[in-house]
Image (cartoon, grey):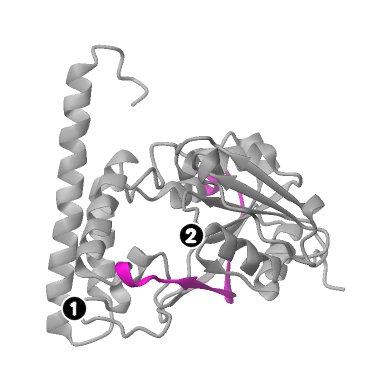
């Protein structure tokens, strides 16, 4: 047996979408290992919590559901999962990810052989829909998916951590970031990974392990993608990385497939939306600071 192939994991699904949870549980049950546990953090009122589907591969004793009672946000839910997990090693899967047993096994092996944080490649699955002209591979990151021709990085849709090591390093998810309610705030995942590695943790990207990200029709609209870019700008400001974030978004948006003129036009369009988000957040932050006469040293 490969070293670490039987490492027990707590698979965590954080979700604020009642309609998505049953499918997420069913897909995870098909890939989960015999020693694993499933932890569901339902970021919603208790009355909205749907029934958890039963599965022969996932007995009730292996499943735990924690309800936040109201929407507290993705970063809050991830932090709670780190505290409540039954095992040292935790895998976070978004509620629209299709995991595989092979991907989970590769994460087990990486964690068992010294990685403190690891993640898989995430491939966009458009579910039979045609990719619109305003969505090149340079905008796939707005859908939480890696560009096929670019190296993967560790993103929140499918990644695993050594939670004990994170606690020793004093690293947690920044609760100003990540989805909250209907906002599209992001970057709680990459900020966490950045903090871990800055404090000496080992990160391993599993380029050959792949999961699919189910993309619904409403995300394949220009309005959604521009809104997502706007919130990317707000997120970059919140983590004090606006200048580098704008440059990163310009490079990504310009790197897509397709004709150069189209790529340039899209890069201008999406990066402008990012820039508006940066400015909006900075102004909002300044207004909030003016209204709060308290100390600002920890902001």
Image quadrant holding the C terminus, namely: top left
Q: Nearer the viewer, residue 229 or 12?
A: 12
Image quadrant holding the N terminus, namely: bottom right
Task: Please state if 177 lies on the left or on the right of 161 as rendered.
Answer: left
Position of 214 relative to 201 (above/below): below
Magenta stretch contains residue 215: yes
Q: Is residue 119 visible?
A: no
Look at 37% across and 66% down and name the residue there.
143
Position of 11 relative to 75 (above/below): below
Q: Is residue 10 visible?
A: yes
| SS class, disc 1 | helix
Rendered image: mark on residue 263:
1
Where residue 2 sits: x, y (%)? 83, 72
Look at 20% across and 46% down and name the residue there.
278
Q: Quadrant of residue 273?
A: bottom left
Whether label 1 touches label 2, CB < 8 Å? no
Outermost residue on the right side: it is 1
Where residue 23 sits: x, y (%)? 57, 65
Look at 21% across and 39% down and name the residue there.
281
Task: Please state if 182 lies on the left or on the right of 96 as rendered.
Answer: left
Q: Quadrant of residue 256?
A: bottom left
| SS class, disc 2 | loop
| Separation (CA) of disc 1 from disc 2 | 24 Å
Q: Which residues are magenta?
A: 195-218
Q: Residues within 10 Å of mark 2 (few under 14, many from 20)?
A: many
Magenta stretch contains residue 18: no
Q: Nearer the viewer, residue 55 or 240?
A: 55
Where residue 287 sits: x, y (%)? 16, 26
Task: Please state if 198 lies on the left or on the right of 262 as rendered.
Answer: right
* Residue annotated with mark 2: 155
Look at 41% across and 64% down and name the residue there.
144
Q: Residues within 10 Å of mark 1 (few under 14, many from 20)?
A: many
């Amino acid at each position: 047996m490969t070293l670490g192939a039987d490492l027990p994991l707590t698979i965590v699904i954080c979700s604020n979408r009642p309609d998505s949870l049953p499918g997420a549980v069913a897909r995870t049950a098909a890939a989960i290992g015999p020693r694993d546990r499933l932890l569901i953090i339902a970021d919603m009122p208790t009355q909205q919590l749907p029934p958890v589907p039963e599965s022969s591969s996932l007995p009730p004793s292996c499943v735990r559901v924690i309800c936040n009672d109201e929407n507290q946000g993705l970063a809050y839910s991830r932090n709670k999962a780190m505290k409540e997990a039954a095992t040292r090693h935790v895998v976070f899967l978004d509620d629209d990810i299709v995991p595989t047993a092979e991907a989970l096994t590769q994460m087990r092996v990486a964690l068992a052989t010294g990685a403190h944080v690891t993640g898989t490649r995430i491939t966009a699955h458009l579910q039979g829909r045609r990719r619109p002209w305003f969505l090149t591979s340079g905008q796939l990151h707005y859908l939480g998916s890696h560009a096929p021709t670019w190296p993967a990085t560790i993103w929140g849709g499918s990644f695993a951590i050594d939670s004990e090591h994170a606690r020793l390093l004093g690293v947690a998810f920044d609760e100003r970031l990540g989805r909250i309610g209907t906002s599209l705030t992001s970057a709680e995942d990459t900020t966490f990974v950045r903090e871990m590695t800055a404090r000496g943790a080992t990160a391993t990207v599993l380029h050959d392990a792949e999961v699919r990200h189910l993309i619904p029709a409403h995300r394949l609209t220009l309005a959604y993608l521009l809104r997502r870019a706007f919130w990317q700008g707000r997120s970059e400001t919140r983590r004090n990385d606006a200048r580098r974030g704008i440059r990163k978004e310009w490079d990504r948006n310009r790197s897509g497939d397709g004709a150069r003129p189209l790529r340039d036009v899209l890069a201008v369009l999406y990066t402008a939306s990012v820039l508006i988000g940066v400015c909006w957040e900075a102004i909002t932050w300044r207004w909030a600071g003016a209204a709060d006469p308290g100390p600002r040293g920890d902001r």
